[in-house]
Image (cartoon, rainbow, N blue to C red):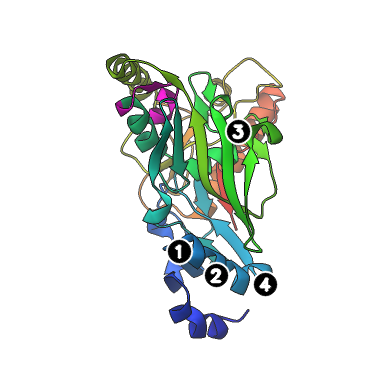
Amino acid sequence: MEIADIKKSVLLIDGDIFFDQSIKNLNWFNIGGKTKIFFKPKSLKGLIEYLKLYALRGKIFILGNGSNVLFDDETYQGTVIKLGKNFSNITLLDNETIIAGAAASQKKVSEFAKDNNISGLEFMSCIPGSIGGGIRMNSGCFKKEFKDFLISIQVVDFKGLVRSIPANKISFNYRSIELPKDLIFLSATFKGKVKNSEEINNYMTELNTIKNMAQPTKIKTSGSTFKNPISQTDKKVWELIKSSVSHEISYGDAVISKKHANFFVNKKNAKAADMKSLINFVKKKVKDQTGIKLELEIVVVE
């Protein structure tokens, strides 16, 4: 599908379409060039319309809150899709069950659960990503993960077919799931347990206090750069990096946080090339020093 064909179809699709859109300000690293097409559907109908028009003829990347992604400096030769506000609704199914749109933030879902006396999702208050992103990587912290509370998900594939997938039909791994890449998550159903909202709030406050003591805030970062290598060692990845690499190392404005060694930071105007160089340097140093091969947690989009 050529750009000219898509431009002709813009008025027929329920959504906002932009061409040669900068993606630098759409991610927490504040890094990246442009995307050939940026599409923000206003409805499921609009999303399906666009998918039927374009999906089988070009690359697609689904962008959530941009908190765990590194875009390339060059133009992305495809479509970046970011679900609009109509995909961020959160509703109560019963006194233990929540349905959350894929564009809803995990923090808002945890707050909604608290306000409705549902416990179990407190850990989400510490994760900056969207529900859709959380599904794709089986988000978690404080020994809790999406898989522990997920009942089902609703998806649409690149052909525009919508279906539900029960959680017991999904293979969950540490920070990943085994589902086709041509699925766009629309919503998720979670089940917790009834508990007093004040107790839930106190626990959320405790978790966030611990998080803020250990992790940097108000900086340009995508959080944990590498996964903890749980199959190779009991040590946390930040411990491996701290013992293997000097905190003073930098590539351009790409640096390692002094507060948390697994948080890589755009100090000012880092390029994707700078961040990739830092990532590759750290991977090599840790491998040389410890024999452990690190795996990225952030998603690199090229």
* 274 displayed left or right of 265: right
The amino acid pointed to by label 2 is Tyr
Give the residues drawn in magenta, as a range. Answer: 115-126
**Quadrant position of residue 94:** top left
Residue denoted by label 4: 57
How far apart are the two marked residues, 2 and 1, measured between alpha carbons? 8 Å
- Tell me the mark number nearer the camera, choosing from 1 and 4: 1
From what the image shows, is residue 145 above or below residue 206?
below
How far apart are the two marked residues, 4 and 2, measured between alpha carbons? 11 Å
Q: Position of residue 187 (x, y in %)?
A: 50, 45
Sequence order check, earlier mark of 3 and 1? 1
Q: Residue furthest left?
A: 198
- Residue at 43%, 72% in the rendered image: 18
* 63 displayed left or right of 116: right
Sequence order check, earlier mark of 4 and 2? 2
**How dense is the environment of label 1, judged by Cα within 10 Å: few (below 14), some, or many (20 and up)?**
many
How far apart are the two marked residues, 3 and 2, measured between alpha carbons? 29 Å
Q: Which mark is residue 175?
A: 3
Q: Nearer the viewer, residue 16 or 225?
A: 16
Sequence order check, earlier mark of 3 and 4? 4
Q: Secondary structure at mark 2?
A: helix
Could you tell me if residue 208 is visible in this image?
yes
The amino acid pointed to by label 4 is Arg
Residue denoted by label 1: 41
How far apart are the two marked residues, 3 and 1, measured between alpha carbons? 27 Å
Q: Nearer the viewer, residue 116 or 183?
A: 116
Sequence order check, earlier mark of 3 and 2? 2
Sequence order check, earlier mark of 1 and 4? 1
Tags 3 and 4 touching, CB below 8 Å:
no
Residue denoted by label 2: 50
